[in-house]
Amino acid sequence: MGKCGLFDLEKHFAFYGAYHSNPTNIAIHMMFVWPIFFAALLILYFTPSLLNLRFSLFGNDVDLLLNFGSLSALIYTLFYICLDAKAGSFAALHCSFCWVSSWLEFSLAWKAGQFIGHGVFEKGAPAFLDNLSLALIMAPLFVLLETLQAFLDYEPCPGFHENVQAKIKAEIND
């Protein structure tokens, strides 16, 4: 079951986990990462359409715009499913919900909470300062897997949590 390279979930989770060991900071991230993800998709929704697909659904014409928002949601969805089919599918539902929703407002407080969590509770910089792309891609799935592990004792594969904790410890000690 061991995946490597781009699809090495343990490696990605350990990298991100090394920046998130304080329980208060983890709680802050659990509350705010998905709203930030939603806000980013909402902003990207207003980018110009790359492709406009028109089709009929139950006798009504429907326009499906492919823009940077929908493209980003699709990429995240497929990547998460490739990393872990079960949690990735659940994350895909979250991504889809974020993509189709438009009723929440963007708030600077969501971002501020992330920096407070790192500065005050972790006593360190956020992960995106060391690896922006990996941090932005892994944050939503990391939060989801942390939640699934904490409340449902879910692991993508046997020994995942134990292996990741060892890698996080090594990452922190480097």
Image: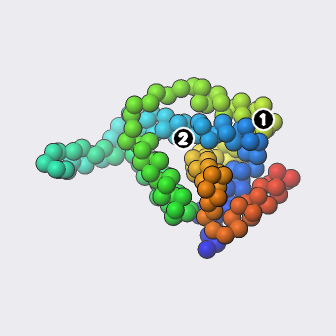
Element at label 1: helix
Which mark, residue 121? Answer: 1
Location of residue 133 in the rendering, given as x and y in whole percent from the top left corner: 60, 48
Is disc 1 surrounded by few (<14), some (14 to 19) or many (20+) residues within 10 Å? some
Is disc 2 surrounded by few (<14), some (14 to 19) or many (20+) residues within 10 Å? many
Q: Earlier in the sequence, mark 1 or mark 2?
A: 2
- Which corner quadrant of the image does residue 24 belong to? top right
Give above or below for 41 relative to 5: above
Give above or below for 105 relative to 51: above
Q: Which one is in front, 164 or 67?
A: 164
Is residue 25 at all visible to an observer of this figure? yes
Query: Distance between the Cα atoms at labels 1 and 2?
Result: 20 Å
Extreme residue in the bottom direction: 1
Location of residue 83 in the rendering, given as x and y in whole percent from the top left corner: 56, 62
Q: Which residue is mark 2?
A: 34
Extreme residue in the front direction: 152
Give above or below for 48 relative to 80: above
